[in-house]
Image (spheres, rainbow, N blue to C red):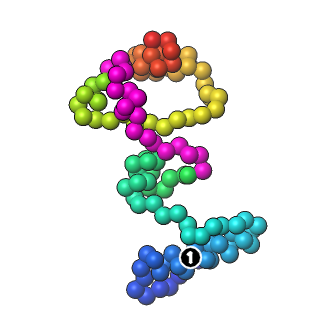
């Protein structure tokens, strides 16, 4: 599809494209609620690590600094002590590989860290 618009603004483009997308979705038997969610670039990068995040899985990156502030794991302690942050996301469900696979297939420092957080430390 090609849209020809003179002096286009972001709001004008959205006002043309959103109803069109809603109709396309309706044609294939799906409902699309408007307005579509808008996310600033800075939020997308900070929360999802990508400028085109896949929001279907709810894997937002969160600040975990408070949870790890007293952690004995050196890299986290050092980063926080230097004014940095510890960030990560939760992965739910059954693991695809057992912890032993991770600890045996990674470098020595990574094995120590994984063993610590996998309950083997």
Secondary structure category for the residue under label 1: helix
Can residue 68 be seen in this snapshot? yes
Residue 121 on image: x %, y %: 45, 11
Q: Residue furthest top?
A: 121
On the picture, is 75 further left or further right than 43? Answer: left
**Magenta residue span:** 56-76
Query: Measuring 52% from the left and 35% from the top, which residue is drawn there?
Result: 90
> Who's the residue at 43% across and 82% down the image?
8
Q: What residue occupies the far bottom of the structure in this picture? A: 6
Query: Residue 60 location, x and y as percent?
Result: 49, 45
Q: How many marks?
A: 1
Q: Position of residue 12 (x, y in %)?
A: 47, 81
Q: Which residue is mark 1?
A: 17
Q: Quadrant of residue 113?
A: top left
At a point 41% along the width and 54% down the height, the residue shown is: 43
Residue 68 falls within the magenta-colored stretch: yes
For disc 1, the neighbor class at 10 Å (few under 14, some 14 to 19, many from 20) is few
Does the segment drawn in magenta span residue 62? Answer: yes
**Measuring 65% from the left and 67% from the top, which residue is drawn there?**
32
Q: Is residue 114 above or below residue 92?
A: above
Q: Residue furthest right?
A: 29
In this picture, residue 85 sits left or right of residue 35: left
Q: Position of residue 114 (x, y in %)?
A: 46, 20
Q: Which quarter of the figure has residue 74? A: top left
């Amino acid at each position: 599809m090609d849209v020809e618009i003179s002096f286009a603004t972001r709001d004008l483009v959205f006002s043309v494209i959103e109803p069109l997308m809603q109709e396309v979705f309706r044609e294939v038997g799906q409902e699309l609620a408007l307005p579509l969610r808008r996310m600033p670039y800075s939020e997308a990068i900070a929360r999802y690590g990508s400028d085109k995040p896949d929001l279907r899985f709810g894997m937002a990156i969160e600040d975990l600094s408070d949870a790890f502030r007293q952690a004995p794991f050196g890299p986290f302690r050092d980063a926080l002590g230097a004014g940095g942050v510890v960030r990560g996301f939760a992965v739910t469900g059954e693991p695809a590989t057992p912890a032993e696979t991770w600890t045996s297939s990674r470098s020595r420092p990574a094995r120590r860290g994984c063993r610590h957080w996998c309950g083997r430390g």
